[in-house]
Amino acid sequence: MYIVSRFSPYLGIVAALALGIFISVFSGSTTVSRIPIIIPIASPTTPEVVVASTKSVGATTSVQTHSSVSKKIPASSTPAAVAVTPPTAESIAALNAALDTSALILRSALVNIICYAPARSGIHSISGSGVIIDPKGIILTNAHVAQYFLLADRDVSCTIRSGSPATDSYNAALAYISPAWLKANPTVLTKTTPSGTGEYDFAFLAITKSATDSKLPSIFPYMTLSTTPPKDTPVVIASYGSQFLEASQITNGLFPTIVFGSVKDVLTFGTNTIDVLALGGSAAAQEGSSGGGVADVFRNLVGTITTSTITGTTDTRSLDAITASYIRGEYASETGQALDLLLAESPATAVADFAPRISELESIITANLP
């Protein structure tokens, strides 16, 4: 069982859609500052659910606004619009079949990341999403989710869950978290309702062992991380959205949300690169979807959900994802090497190589904690 919302993918080609990724491009600049969608959840010993859009005691897990914001890509840097031939029934059927296949792959690679913080620690327990992008068990998620993996010495524990409903499946460790994000957002855990753009907001986790009596699979279900932005407008969005659930439902009755949509606009952190896919209102535009995936018709992961407005009905909200090409480029810029080199390593090696940086990166955020 999972929640499915389907819209005709061709609507985004001939007219503006109420759902999906923005593809129309305008000149000029606009500031994007939205509340990230990660839902704080109650720890096992605390029954209440604290939603990031409401005032609460202690730190929340939203992303702080910083000076470098995304903006519209100048129209002169993008291809001119071309005439569109009305689709035939056969082409629509073929496209829907391709989208269904992408949805199945994305659904199988989707995980829920749940982290528990001790009561009275000043840190909220949280639930977010992620996508396995390598058959060896490498998970792409947000830095504002993965930062919890830096806090193990504060008795914060995280588990990777999967399935419908989500159940404990794996343990994981950090293979990489963007230092640029941590340095730009050192006080996120102390903010009630901070906001941000999604810049630098990515991290990689490596599955290290099973959280059950079963052995780890020899090959994990995964979705290949794209090397380029979406070439076609139809997309599939998947996450473990949990904004409207009670703590007990998040623990025992959390199901994936799958949305079919279309590209509507793209934005950049730089000059003319496609860095942000702005997704319109949908069932995926809710807390808990952070780290969820956006897939194209070619069975590639083209983006990871980072930020959203979280008030009003979901169909009126604004949902953003940073692109796979942006993540690849930023990782290369921060590390001096291609992301594929990280993915070529074994999970154990990736974790061991990153481990010496944990203490330094942890200190960036713990300096601002109670």
Image (spheres, rainbow, N blue to C red):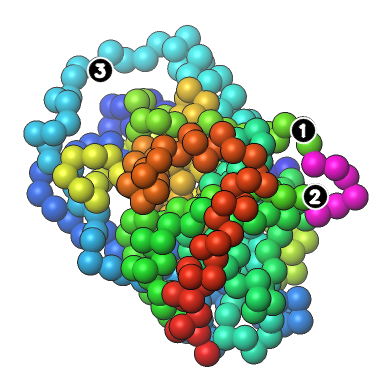
Q: Residue furthest right?
A: 213
Residue located 88% across and 45% down the image:
214
292 or 285, nearer to the observer:
292
**On screen, residue 161 above or below 90:** below
Check disc 3 and report the residue beneath it: 84
Alpha carbons under labels 3 and 2: distance apart:
49 Å
- Residue 348, magenta (yes or no): no
Q: Secondary structure at mark 3?
A: loop
Residue located 33% across and 47% down the image:
333
Q: Earlier in the sequence, mark 2 or mark 1?
A: 2
Which contiguous range is marked in magenta? 210-216
Check disc 1 and report the residue beneath it: 218
Q: Secondary structure at mark 2?
A: strand
Q: Amino acid at mark 1?
A: Ser
Q: Position of residue 30 (x, y in %)?
A: 17, 56
Q: How many marks?
A: 3
Alpha carbons under labels 2 and 1: distance apart:
12 Å
Check disc 2 and report the residue beneath it: 210
Alpha carbons under labels 3 and 1: distance apart:
45 Å
Q: Amino acid at mark 2?
A: Ser
Q: Is residue 24 visible?
A: yes
213 or 193, nearer to the observer:
213
Q: Is residue 42 visible?
A: no
